[in-house]
Image (cartoon, rainbow, N blue to C red):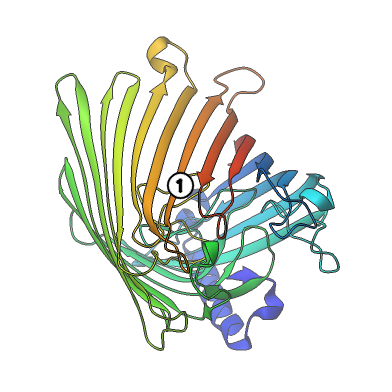
Amino acid sequence: MVVPFSRLSRRRIAHFSALVMCGGFAAQSQAGGFIEDSSAKLEARTVYFNRDFRDGSSSSPQGASKRDETAQGFILNLQSGYTEGTVGFGLDALGMLGLKLDSSPADSNSGLLPSTGSDPRRSKDQYAKFGLTAKMRVSDTVLKYGALLPDLPLLKYNDGRLLPNMFNGALLVSREIKDLTFTASRLDRYTARDSTDSQDLRLNCKNKRYACNITSDQFNLYGLDYKVNEHLTAQYHYAELEDIYRQQFVGLLASHPVGPGKLSADVRVLKSDDAGSAKANAIDNRALGAMLAYSLGGHKVSAGWQRMNGDTSMPYLDGSNPYLVNYLQVNDFANAQERSWQLRYDYDFKAMGIDGLSFMTRYVNGDHIKVAGSAEEGKEWERDSEVKYIVQSGTFKDVSLRFRNATYRTNYEKFARDVDETRLIVSYNLSIW
C-alpha cells in the first residue's frame, strides 16, 4: 500500500494490520526464513534530462521550448523472506527520495520532479514516497497486497525518469503446474513517477487521443504464460480498466540456434475495446507487432513491424509502458491506423575484450496515421542511440554510466512536436545485505 497513510481507509488499515500481526506472530515462532532470506538494496540514481522541442517559448501557444533538469534519486528496496510452515508470511518496503540539483521555471516539468502547488513552473526541492507490501506464500503460489512494481505484458510500470511509478493493489502469481505461470491482479490506485500522491487509475491520453482525466478505481488482469519447450513460450493475458477499456493479448516468444548464432522472434497481438459505460468514448484497436533478431558474437541485428487497425489508438494505463515492439524512448507509434517498421543494432563490446560496455541504435518510421480533424496522412519517425558502461573493478566498481539520445520528427504538429532529447544517467546499486 502506498503512503501517505492519511488517504487510506480505516478498513484497509485494519486489514493490513491483521496481515502484519499474523506475519509477526509466525515470524516469532518460526523466524528462520523471514530473516535469513531477507534482502536490502539501495540504488542511487543521478539523472540529467534535456528535451528540446525545437520551437515555442514559455509564453507561446506551443508551450516551453525545452525541458532541462537534473535530479538525484534514491530507491531503497527491503524484502523479507517468508516465515516457515505451510503458509509463509512476509513484508516488503519500498522507499524513494528525489532531490533537485538543477532546475529553472522556464525549463521545468521534465517528469523528474513534481511542481510546487503555488507555481506549476517551479519544481520542488525534494519529494519522497513510501510503500508497504504484505505477502503470503503457499507452495508455489505468492499473493502480494500493497505497493507493486508489476512487469507484465498489459501492466508494465514506467521507470523512464528519476523514480518509478508505483501501483497499489493485489497481485497473485502461481506456478503450481510445471511450465505454466498463472497471474491475476486487481489495482485501485497509483502514484505517478513525479508525484507523492496516490490517485485513481487513469487512461493515458498522449497527444489527446482520448478524453483526458478519465479515471477508474479498478483494474483487473488475468494471464497465462506456458513454456512449450526450451525454445518457445506462449502467452495470453486479459485486462480491463472498469468502465473504460478491455484488452486481450496473445504472444509468442521463440528462439533457436541457427548456424553459428541464434535467431529469436517476439510476436504480439492485442485487441482493445471500450468497456462498461465507456467513459472515454468508443475504443476500437487491434495492434499487431513482430520483432525478429539474429545474434552472433557481440552483434545483434533486429527488424520490427507494427500495425494499428481500427478507429482509435491503442489504450493503456497512465504510468505504464505499452507492450508494443515499436515503443521507444519518446514515442509509442500507437496512433489510429498507424503502420511502422523498425531496424535495430546492438553490440556488446565483451566480444572485443571490453567487459561492461554496450551500444544500441534503432530507427522507427511510421505512416498512414489517421489524424482527427484532418484529411492529411500523419507521419513520424524516431532515431535512438544508447551507450552504457558498468565499471568492472576498483573504487567505482558497479557504477553504471548510461547516455541516451533520441530524435523525433512528425508532420502533425497540432498533436505532437518535434523533439531532440538527451538523457544521462549515473547509477549505483548497493546490496546492504
Q: Amino acid at mark 1?
A: Glu
Check the image and report above or below for 218 versus 262: below
Kind of element beneath mark 1: strand
Which residue is located at x 52 percent, y 56 percent?
A: 80
Residue 49 position by quadrant: top right
Q: Is residue 210 left or right of residue 239?
A: right
Residue 210, percent from left and from top: 49, 72
Q: Nearer the viewer, residue 339 or 176?
A: 339
**Quadrant showing the N terminus:** bottom right
Q: Nearer the viewer, residue 173 or 80?
A: 173
Which residue is located at x 68 percent, y 57 percent?
A: 62
Q: How many marks?
A: 1
Which residue is located at x 42 percent, y 63 percent?
A: 375
Check the image and report above or below for 140 versus 15: above
Which residue is located at x 23 percent, y 36 percent?
A: 264
Residue 307, percent from left and from top: 29, 54
Q: Identify the residue position indicated by label 1 in the image.
A: 380
Q: Badge 1: few (under 14), some or many (20 or more) residues near its Cα, within 10 Å?
A: many
Q: Is residue 263 left or right of residue 106?
A: left
Q: Nearer the viewer, residue 380 or 349?
A: 380
Check the image and report above or below for 336 versus 388: below
- Residue 28 at least partly seen: no
Residue that sits furthest to the right in the current view: 118
Residue 98, percent from left and from top: 73, 51
Residue 194 position by quadrant: bottom right
Q: Nearer the viewer, residue 384 or 371?
A: 371
Residue 133, percent from left and from top: 53, 66
